[in-house]
Amino acid sequence: MDLLDHNLSGALPVLKDYTGLRATPENFITLMDYAMQWQPELIPQLVFRNGKGNILGFVDFLTGGKENSYASDIVQHAEIGRTRTVLKNVSITGNEFTSAENHNLRPGDVIMISNGTDETQAKVTATPTDKVFEALNDRGVGFTGFTTVTVIVDFSSRFNKGTEGYDRGRKATPEIIQNFTHIVKGFYDVAESEMAQITWIQTPEGPKWFNLEMELNSINHDNKVELTAIFNYRADDTADSTLAGHDQGMKGAIQMIEERGNIANEYIETLADLGEVAKRIKIEGPCREVTIWGDHQQMLHFNEIAAGVNASFAGGASYGVFNNSKEMAIFLDFKTIFYAGVTFHFRSWDLLDDPTLMGATGFDTTSLGWIAIPTGMKDVTIDGNAAKIPYFNIRYRKAGIVDRRKKVKFRGILGVEQSLDRASVEYITEMTAQLAGANNFYVGRRSEFYV
C-alpha cells in the first residue's frame, strides 16, 4: 500500500507533532472508516499491489446493507410452501391410492390424475390413513392403465344437493428453518516499542490514530466473516471434530442452498441453458428477477449468449427489447437481459477468480462458477408474526449491552495493562446467516461436482 500525504482535494491531515497524545481504543480509526466518513475522495488512493484483499460487497448487495441481531444460540424462521399440493409416484390398487407423503385429502375432494400418457379425474370417497385414500373414477370404469400416477390434490370439490360439506379443515404446516451461532476471532500483537509506527491524523472529532498492520488484520477479519457466511459448512454431528468436542458452527449460504435450493454442474453456456434456468425459476415461485454472480469464464459465456440475441446473422435469436449486433453486445459487456419472462442481471465476482481464494489450484475446478440469487424481500413468520426479510441476511449476536458484531479488545499500551511488553488487539464476531426461500437460489459448480 502506498498511502500518499496528498490527494486531489489537498493534503491528508497527518499530525506531525502528536506530543501528549495517547493511543487508546477511543481514538483509534481505520483508514477506510476515515475516508468513508470525511474524505470519500481518498478511497481510490487506498491502493494495494494486488488489491487490499477486501472482498466485502457481496453480502451488502444481498442484504441491502441491512443488519439484524439475535439473542440466542439458534436463529429460526418458518416458511410455508405452496398452497396447492401435488403427490408424485402414487400407486393405485383398485380404487385405493397409496402416497409416500401425507395426502391431506378429504371425502368430497375432486382430484386430477396423470400417468404420463393419459389423464383422468376422480372423486375422493374415503381417507383411511394420512397416506391412503379411496377415489372413484369420473371418466370411466376403474383405473385400468393407471398404476403409478401423479395427483393434483387442490383441484375441485363436489357435493350432492342438501348434503353436509367437509367435517374438517386443512391446515398448512410450516417448515422450521434453523441456523446456529458461529464465533469468528482474529488477533494481532506487536512489541510495544513498535507502536511508535502509528500515524496520527486530524479529524473533525479530534486526533485519531491508525496502524497499517492492524488495518490489514482488521480487513482480514472482516473477510473471514463474509467467507464464513457464504462458504462455511456446519460440522456433521458424527464428524471427528464434533465428536472431539469442538463447536459445529453455522451453515453458510452455499450449504443452505445445496440442502434446500437448486444445484447445477458446469456453466450456463447457451441460450438454451439460460432458458432452463428461467423455467426452473418459474416453477419454484413468483420470483422473476435474479442476479447471477459469475467468475471470468461465466461472464464470457454470458457475453457469447447476449451476442447471439437479435443478431444480424443467420441463426441469431430474438431478444425482443432492442436491436444489437454481435460486436455491440460484446462491447457492452452485457449486464442485464430479459429472457423467457425473467430478468437476469449479471455481475462479475472477483472472489471466484482470486488465486488466494476460489481461484486457487484445485478450487479452480471444484468451486463455484456462478451463483444466482433472487431480488427483493421474502415473507416469513418470526415468533408467530409475519415479517419481510431479505432473501439472505447476516445476523449478529446482540442482547442488552452485549454487541458482538465486531468486538475489539485492546491490551497493553493500547488498553488494559498487562505484564507482557506487547500491545495486542483481538477481534471477535459472533454471527449467523439466515436464508429465506432457498428454492429461489441456484449454485453452479465449474465441473461435474454434484453426483
Image (spheres, helix red, strand yellow):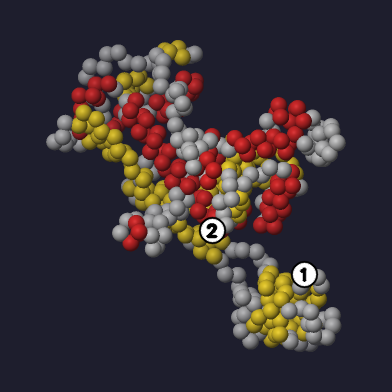
Q: Residue at x 54, y 43 (%)?
A: 365
Residue 444 versus residue 451: which sits nearer the camera?
451
What secondary structure is found at the residue carrying circle 2? helix
Residue tagged 2:
259
Task: Mark 2 vs mark 1: give the one in front.
Answer: 1
Instruction: Kindly indicate whether the residue at mark 1 contacts the one at mark 2 (C-beta within 8 angstroms).
Output: no
Is residue 415 something one can see in this rendering? Answer: no
Please provide percent x and percent y for residue 161.
81, 86
Residue 17: which quarter of the image? top left
Query: What's the distance in space between the residues labelled 2 and 1, CA to CA?
Result: 28 Å
- Sort mark 1 into few (<14), some (14-19) or many (20+) by Cα contacts within 10 Å: few
Residue 9 versus residue 131: which sits nearer the camera?
131
Please provide percent x and percent y for residue 451.
57, 57
Left or right of 248 on screen, residue 151: right
Q: Amino acid at mark 1?
A: Gly
Residue 390 versus residue 122: which sits nearer the camera?
122
Q: Residue at x 34, y 20 (%)?
A: 201
Residue tagged 1:
116
The quadrant of the picture occupied by the N terminus is top left
Q: Is residue 220 above or below residue 445?
A: above
Q: Which callout, 2 or 1, points at the residue further toward the start of the chain?
A: 1
Is residue 52 something one can see in this rendering? Answer: yes
